[in-house]
Amino acid sequence: MTARPKRNLVKRYAAFYLWLLAALLLFLSSTSVLAAPKDRQAPTAPSLLTAAQVTETTVDLTWKASTDQVGVAKYLIYQGTGQIGTAVSTAYKVTGLKPGTAYSFTVIAADAAGNISAASTVLRVTTLAATTTTTPPTVVTASKTVIGYYTGWSTYNGLQVASIDGSKLTHINYAFANVGTDLRIALSDPYADVEKRFPDDLATDPFFGNFNQLLKLKKKYPHLKTLISVGGWGGSAQFSNAALTDTSRTTFADSAVAFIVKYGFDGVDIDWEYPVAGGDAGNVNRPEDKTNFTLLMQKLREKLDAQGAKDGKTYLLTFAGAASSGYLNNIELGKLQAVVNYVNVMSYDLHGTWETKTGLNAPLYKDPASGFTWETSVNDAIALYRNAGVPAAKLVMGLAFYGSKYDNVTNANNGLYQSFSGGSSVTYASLKTNYIGQGYTRYFHTEAKVPYLFNGSSFITYDDPESLGYKTAYIKQQQLAGAMIWSLGYDTANSELLTAVYQGLQ
């Protein structure tokens, strides 16, 4: 009988402790509800991963910043599948690489909570081949002009400004700026043009991007001149409106002058495709464009000269013109040439995949046995401009660093002048890597002085060092001003075509 009270006391204590434990658990659960939720949202993946500069043993990576609700804490850099480093900025220098070796890189963003983003797109880079000697930059000694177009989009997947061999050029035309709806010159890609950071950029630089890289390239090659090219196939929609009245012409010209002064260019190149008729869908065209183009260029010349008088320098004015009589009928070439330094003749795309049969992209001379009912050539295009009053000393022959590939071609006549279905453009760099000597037979047209490839079903027309040798000899024989290249980013990594042009003009 005496043990029973003790058992009751034990039960009371057990019940009390169970109640206390339940209260504690209830308290803890309520405080966890009130606590701030943990950050579980990952940053966005880094974008636009590019190689800003490539040497034998290093690769300078840059990318566009990720976004995160709290903030990106760092970036994880991967070579292949292994992490090789971290960065807090949007640039990273990879070192210790082997010359002439292919590598792949990705970048992942991480926030302070440990959330990580998806990987960037894979960037594949091959380091430069080993060299035994280093040649310092030299000033161009050729008496001829060598103008290379550099496209702003090359920074995303091809040639970087810092890698351009300025010793073989006299001018770089940066393609493109646009004509805005306010009829003023406008950046076409602000990120590539003035925002993208490169490893050698300083916080004190007034702007970044390709424009800043061009300024640095000119310091390396003091003879080099740069021009902003305005328009192009996709950027000419507003030219007719900009040229329409004296007020609109003044607005555009004033903005162009302010643009080149702000960003350090030496002139303006107008690439209006095209006055009066033609060009991209949606372009504004008027019959008055013929006269208004002249007035626009005269206004630009006036404003450039006025700014030059203030700055104590000569600003350049050029334009790019099509290689056809139809184009020349829609402009006042005699008056235009009087106010420009050079006329860049786009003497390529003479045939292409918009036609019904294969043809040669830029034959130097006509093929007497052409399969077309009409035929033209680079020689004919130059003659058109000379006969219209342009002095040879202002004429610049356009050279294509790309070709046209036709598919499903009838297997006859080595593919030339045959029906086809489908096709595309192909850069010379791609031709060297993927086509030449890889199942294709190379032919050289003895009359037209250009090569082409055929494999039984695909036909490719292009230029190479041999055909450029004939064209540079023609430039010298005809005493033309020089050569224009579309475009530098289509060449091989060792500048095979640019070297051929430079050497051919010596």
Image (cartoon, rainbow, N blue to C red):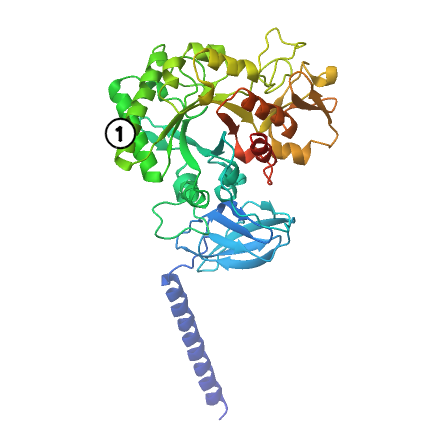
Q: Image height check: is 246 above or below 2?
A: above
SS type, badge 1: helix
> Which residue is identified by label 1?
306
Q: Which residue is depicted at the point 36% across and 62% down?
A: 34
Q: Which residue is depicted at the point 75% across and 30% down?
A: 439
Q: Could you tell me the amino acid type at mark 1?
A: Ala
Residue 51 position in % (x across, y down): 53, 46
Give whichever of 371, 223 is nearer the camera: 223
- Residue 72 visible, this angle: yes
- Residue 45 visible, this angle: no
Q: Image height check: is 67 above or below 223?
A: below
Q: Quadrant of residue 19?
A: bottom left
Is residue 288 found left or right of 469 in the rendered image? left
Is residue 258 found left or right of 1 in the rendered image? left
Q: Residue furthest bottom?
A: 2
Q: Image height check: is 61 above or below 34?
A: above
